[in-house]
């Protein structure tokens, strides 16, 4: 997956003239803070240089994870066509660009972000773009949010890992109160990211939410550590991206986990929800082994062989993260 051309150009324009060494040092510092999940009361994106490093080294991957999560959500809820969006911890506006790419219906967006540098960057990137009418607000995700009107779609992407765990339940309640139709939370696809999504998931289900994706059920997650649920997207690295990370390979795999929760059951929940493929399919000669999460709340391996006819042909088409067409 690549950034949409207009966003790629806006980023290139924004980064023009920035010394490569400056980007490298800032990207390295950012990466160490993210990996260590540093919480020292300072924002990671606390200035223009950190923001530039984020654009060069992280935005392509978070965009890919968000856009993929939205595609899964749109597949589960084909009738969902949001007009309004509230995005908390908006950073450079990754969600805004992905939502605009996913849903033509989007008209208005409220972007809430604590970092001045991130808000400034997000507004600059969107300045010349045909995006929904977006308003940017300074706001703290751990306090009452500066917005009262609910939106069709509420999002929180790659933010929970920057918050103290005890701030999460109240934030989930605030986000759900602002959700008219759908809440989407995206996190890094690490065991810790999965645990945070599980916290969000159980709180939302207790509040009456329906899981639209990825789980085909509202039962407790059947996976047990050291296993964890996550998905992956291959992200193309631009030349600047490679140079910033001192990387040679022209792509990277972004692991992510997401949860889409809806006020009303979505189309995918109407009949028996289709199983979700929760690991890379293992292809052998005339056989495919799929690890599936099932509507009855269990998970496990299923072997499909050539003898299974249409089921085998369907299984050949599915990838990690997809639903397996029902009837298989
Ligand atoms: C990793 S970035 C993610 C940005 C964007 N959502 C994305 O997915 O690319 C996390 C963002 O959350 C913001 N953030 C962190 N703590 C916050 C808080 N307490 N309130 C509001 N925003 C916060 C950071 O400033 C940063 O812009």
Image (tube, rainbow, N blue to C red):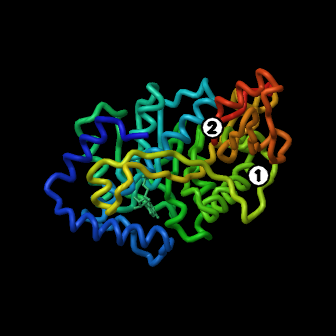
> In the image, ligand 1 is in what quadrant?
bottom left
In this rendered view, identify the residue nearer to me: 315 or 179: 315
Q: Is residue 116 visible?
A: no
Using the image, determine if residue 35 lies above or below residue 263. Answer: below
Mark toward the start of the polypeptide (1 vs 2): 1
Q: Is residue 245 left or right of residue 81?
A: left
Q: Please give the residue where the numbered disc 2 appears in the rendered image.
A: 319
Q: Secondary structure at mark 1?
A: helix
Q: Quadrant of the C terminus?
A: top right
Residue at the (84%, 47%) spot, across then down: 298
Residue at the (77%, 53%) spot, across then down: 221
How crowded is the residue under tag 1: few (<14 C-alpha within 10 Å), some, or many (20+)?
A: few
Instruction: Pinpoint residue 87: horizontal percent, then vertical percent.
Output: 46, 47
In this rendered view, identify the residue nearer to me: 209 or 146: 209
The yes-or-no answer for disc 2 within 8 Å of ligand 1 is no
Using the image, determine if residue 324 lies above or below residue 160. Answer: above
The numbered disc on residue 206 is 1
Instruction: Pinpoint residue 41: horizontal percent, then vertical percent.
Output: 44, 76
Extreme bottom residue here? 40
Residue at the (35%, 40%) spot, across then down: 134
Q: Is residue 270 visible?
A: yes
Using the image, determine if residue 194 lies above or below residue 176. Answer: below
Instruction: Pinpoint residue 268: horizontal percent, then vertical percent.
Output: 71, 30
Q: Nearer the viewer, mark 1 or mark 2?
A: 2
Residue at the (50%, 74%) spot, across then down: 36
């Amino acid at each position: 997956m690549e950034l949409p051309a207009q966003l790629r150009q806006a980023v290139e324009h924004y980064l023009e003239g920035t010394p490569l060494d400056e980007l490298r040092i800032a990207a390295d510092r950012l990466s160490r803070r993210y990996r260590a999940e540093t919480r020292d009361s300072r924002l990671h994106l606390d200035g223009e240089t950190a923001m530039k490093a984020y654009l060069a080294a992280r935005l392509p991957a978070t965009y890919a994870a968000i856009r993929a999560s939205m595609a899964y959500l749109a597949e589960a809820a084909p009738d969902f066509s949001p007009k309004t969006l509230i995005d908390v911890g908006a950073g450079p506006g990754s969600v805004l660009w992905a939502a605009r790419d996913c849903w033509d219906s989007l008209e208005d967006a409220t972007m809430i972000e604590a970092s001045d540098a991130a808000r400034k960057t997000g507004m600059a990137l969107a300045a010349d773009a045909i995006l929904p009418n977006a308003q940017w607000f300074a706001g703290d995700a751990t306090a009452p949010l500066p917005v009262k009107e609910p939106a069709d779609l509420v999002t929180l992407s790659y933010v929970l890992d920057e918050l103290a765990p005890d701030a999460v339940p109240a934030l989930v309640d605030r986000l759900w109160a602002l959700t008219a139709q759908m809440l989407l939370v995206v996190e890094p696809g690490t065991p810790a990211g999965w645990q945070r999504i599980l916290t969000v998931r159980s709180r939302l289900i207790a509040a009456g939410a329906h899981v639209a994706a990825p789980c085909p059920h509202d039962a407790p997650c059947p996976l047990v550590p050291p296993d964890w649920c996550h998905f992956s997207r291959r992200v193309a690295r631009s030349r600047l991206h490679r140079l910033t990370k001192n990387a040679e390979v022209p792509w990277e795999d972004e692991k992510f986990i997401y949860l889409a929760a809806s006020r009303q059951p979505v189309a995918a929940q109407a009949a028996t929800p289709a199983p979700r493929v929760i690991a890379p399919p293992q292809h052998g000669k005339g056989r495919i082994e799929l690890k599936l999460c099932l509507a009855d709340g269990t998970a496990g391996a299923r072997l499909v062989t050539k003898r299974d006819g249409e089921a085998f042909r369907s299984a050949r088409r599915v990838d990690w993260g997809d639903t397996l067409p029902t009837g298989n």
